[in-house]
Amino acid sequence: MAWARMLLDAFASVWMAHRRAWLIWAVAVTGLALAVIAGYDFLLRRWMVINLADWLNDLQGLDVNEPLGWARLIGFGIVLPWAVGVPVVYWASALLLNGQGELTLLLAYPYPRWQVLLGRWLALVLGLMLAIVMGSLPLLLWVGWQQGGWLALLREQMLFLALWGLSWANVALCLGVWSGQARLARWSAWLGLLFVWVGVGVGKLFWNSSEQLLGWLLAGVAGMGLVAALWLFERRDILG
Amino acid sequence: MRYLVVRTENLTKFFGHCRGVEDLTIGVEPGQVYGVLGPQGAGKSTLLRLLMDLIRPTRGHALVLGMDVHHQKAAIQRRVGYLPAEFGFVRGGTVGSLLHGLAMLRGGQTWQAAQGLAERFNLDLATPIATLGALQTQKIGLIQAFMHHPDLVVLDEPTRHLDQDAQDVFFRLVSEVRAEGGAVLFTSSVLCEMERVCDQVAVLHHGHLLAVERGVQLRARALRKVEMRFAGPVSADVFCRLPNLEQVRLEDNKLRCLLSGDPDPLLKAASQFRVMDILSQQPTLEEVYRSYYGVGAYAA
């Protein structure tokens, strides 16, 4: 009961604090989705796009000439880890490291620290995911209209890429809490997200296109990263 | 061992090489208003954060309501109200929705109590959080600290940002908590606040406990800077003889001195002359430290 009350308050508080940010993010993702749709006819024949698509095809085994492949590779294949990872690390590190004003009050309430933080982290991530899915709706509808089978957009490597963003964000968060430096968290997040395709390539090399295994591995890193960040926060001095 | 609401023994906290507090041993009795006096950097907030387990001690230990502050944190926090020195609200909504959310976390009849306190502090529950000033933020902080009728209220600089009306409400609340058998521990860098309500005051200096004063003693020797202007020349000897005057200076027809405690002898001595004007001021913390303890408040 107490945990539910705490979680409810976390959702209410995080929603009220971040509702504009989520809306902006959803609009940004919508903009991206519309750009991907608009770019299908214009950019498909350009040599740079073809080269990029060929290179990505090697990694992903998708046909970029089809709307589904186009949407997965050029659309969210490139941007999804960023769309997930960057806000998570920015918002969560602000919550854990900079935005301690309200947290100082709440940590004096009769709940374990990890519950207070996990409630807020969950609310942040769920809100973000909702914003991304809502923002992607135009692209999903376009793929469905052009080719059918739009649900495939939400599966397989899309999940893998979202997990990459999340796992790297949590590892970066961990570094931030450990060092007490939000800047370190943000820089390591940017760096990790920049090399997402290296991760994909290495994954392919070692696990021979076993994305499921890689997905589990990333999910494990994401989970462990979050647990470690909460564990470190439990031991951290809250200076207010 | 006698039950104390707060008991610390050799409580020490270092931030790297920087000393927060060192070897602090204090005890707060049930029904007592306990003040912690000191300038910025004396270790007041560090002491309170240690008691609330927001930071962990380098050595020593602390008991609150007879329980270990780290291992029985949740049990303590149910019965303690806390106001941090620095806090803010990142959420949107109104003061009412914020207080309702905080009351929900406390459970019980807390929301009704919060509404009552908001009325006493003259705080409009419909005010949007985004428009809150320092005064209203501090009022919210105080309301959430008192709303669940805690056995112990721990307040870090509670009167900061408060206007006179809000201060009066705050001091009445403190008296009510004491009357109901609860204890209040609060920090301040203003001596007259301590003189007004405290039963006991710990004086901190650079993280060390300089003295523990009883409230009655403080009130008995309340320090005031007094300036008197006379119609004509006056003799300095009349005033220098008085035992509770220090730093007596006579310039033209003006007397400046530091008065501790009872003003009656000074007024009787001054009545020999025609007094044109009297000005009485609170001394600075620096003057209090130098006068009482022989050290500068900010001196290393």
Image (cartoon, coloured by chain):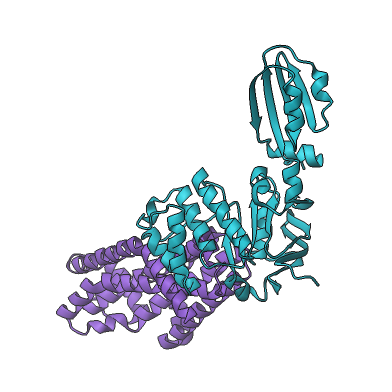
User: Which quarter of the picture shows residue B190?
Assistant: top right
* Left or right position of B207 against A144: right
In the image, residue A28 sits, relative to residue B163, either above or below, namely below
Q: How many marks?
A: 0
The reply to whether residue A61 is visible in this rendering is yes
Q: Seen from this angle, which residue lies furthest left?
A: A145
* Left or right position of B202 against B101: right
Q: Position of residue A125 (x, y in %)?
A: 41, 72
For the residue pair B228 and B210, the one nearer the viewer reads as: B228
For the residue pair B260 and A34, the one nearer the viewer reads as: B260
In the image, residue B278 sits, relative to residue B22, either above or below, namely above
Q: Position of residue B84 (x, y in %)?
A: 57, 57
Q: Position of residue A23 (x, y in %)?
A: 30, 64
Question: What colour do you see for chain B?
Answer: cyan
Among the chains pictured, the one given purple colouring is A
Query: Which residue is rendered at x = 76% and y = 21% of the image?
Result: B249
The reply to whether residue B206 is visible in this rendering is no
For the residue pair A28 and B289, the one nearer the viewer reads as: B289
Q: Seen from this angle, which residue lies furthest top?
A: B232
Which quarter of the rendering shows the N terminus of chain B? bottom right
Query: Which residue is rendered at x = 70% and y = 67% of the image?
Result: B5
Q: Position of residue A215 (x, y in %)?
A: 43, 83
